[in-house]
Image (cartoon, rainbow, N blue to C red):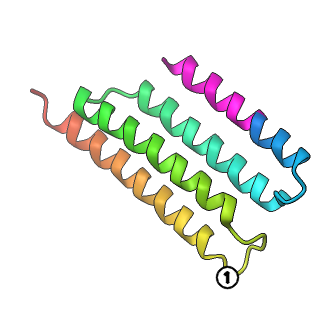
Amino acid sequence: MKSLYVIVGLFALIANVLIGLIVSSYPSFNVGLNSAVIVLTTLLLFVLSSIKLKDAFKISLTLLTCILGCVEFFLGLFANDKFENNWYLVVLVILLLVQGALFMTSYVVSNYSKE
């Protein structure tokens, strides 16, 4: 399953870069931002499948990571092509922090309660 996440993430990254090269209305800032979102989402899914969690945590976090990855990708499509005063970028960072906090909390809770 781990290799499937990497392969799908690699294909999505290649498709994003190729579409960015072909479509002139897709700014390079957004291509880079969405490439980072694809890499981070793939990395989170890979780490999630590698660490030991209870099944309920693993299934729900996998689904949540996929959904939030899609939301982050669409936010990256509509983000302004500048770094300053970019509220889409702020929301992306907050969503990534929430995902990281959920991962850490789930890992601690899953390993704390050994049933």
**What x and y, as percent, mark residue 75?**
60, 61
- Pick out the residue farthest to the left: 115
Please state which amino acid type lies under the numbered disc 1: Asn
- Name the residue: 78% across, 69% down: 81
Residue 99, percent from left and from top: 42, 52
Q: Main secondary structure of the magenta part?
A: helix
Q: Residue at x 47, y 60 (%)?
A: 95
Residue toward you, 94 or 47: 94
Residue denoted by label 1: 85
Q: Which quarter of the picture shows residue 57? A: top left
How packed is label 1: few (under 14 Cα within 10 Å), some, or many (20 or more)?
few
Q: Within the image, what quadrant is residue 48 found in?
A: top left
Q: Which residues are magenta?
A: 1-14
Residues 106 and 24: in front is 24
Q: Position of residue 6 (x, y in %)?
A: 61, 25
**Does the magenta segment cover residue 6?**
yes
**Is 112 displayed left or right of 11 in the figure?**
left
Residue at horizontal 53%, vertical 68%? 91
- The residue located at (64%, 43%) in the rendering is 38
The stretch drawn in magenta includes residue 30: no
Whether residue 42 sits left or right of residue 98 in the image: it is right
- The correct choice, above or below, for 57 with respect to 23 in the image is above
